[in-house]
Amino acid sequence: MCQKAIYAGTFDPVTYGHIDLIKRAQEIFSDVVVAVAHNPHKQPLFSVEERVAMLKQAVSGLNGVVVDDFEGLVVEYARKQKAKVLIRGLRMVSDFEYEFQMALTNRKLSSEVETIFLMPQESYCYLSSKLLKEAASLGADLSCFIPDFVEKALKNKIRKPS
């Protein structure tokens, strides 16, 4: 088995697609750090603390997987974690251009950190947290897309006035 890898994202909220990629990464790498980004350019529904807590519950029982959060550049975070691999998910062809640009930018910023692309199971390829938040706001049953505790938290959060 290989070294430590970082799977960074917003995870707002975590989906079965994210969990699938974490499990795939766990099969390849001895240590997988799921890193929740503090992204000042996004306005997530859940706080960083809430996202970390949901992810910890979602990956409990997976050996070699830890959940953390970070601020700043993911390549700097990887360097601090002594990780040489970033995991990125590719769902559809539409993800490729953005992910490719980000991977090349990260390579330029830190040539010792490599990006590895993983594809989720086909049944999760269309999932996005944004789409699920929209569906939740319309009262959809999301049990086949996200864990029950995430669905409950999502629906509670959407019902609360801002």
Image (tube, grey):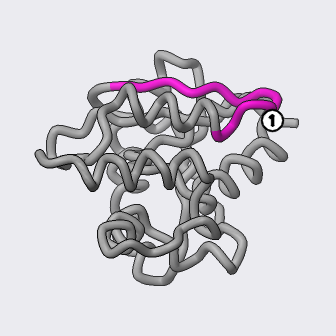
Q: Is residue 84 above or below residue 98?
A: above
Which residue is more in the foreground, 50 or 102? 50
Asked if residue 59 lies in the magenta stretch, the reply is yes
Asked if residue 7 lies in the magenta stretch, the reply is no
Q: Is residue 100 visible?
A: no
Which residue is more in the foreground, 67 or 6? 67
Mark 1 lies on residue:
2
Residue 95 falls in image quadrant: bottom left
Give the residue type that dot 1 points to. Answer: Cys
Q: Which residue is painted at 60% across and 62% down in the image?
A: 17
Residue 47 place in picture, x, y as percent: 30, 33
Which residue is more in the foreground, 160 or 97? 160
Residue 2 place in picture, x, y as percent: 81, 35
All told, the count of numbered labels is 1
Q: Which residue is painted at 50% across and 24% down in the image?
A: 68
Residue numbers of the magenta segment: 58-70
Residue 137 place in picture, x, y as percent: 30, 68
Position of the C terminus, as image quadrant, is: top left
Residue 122 falls in image quadrant: bottom right
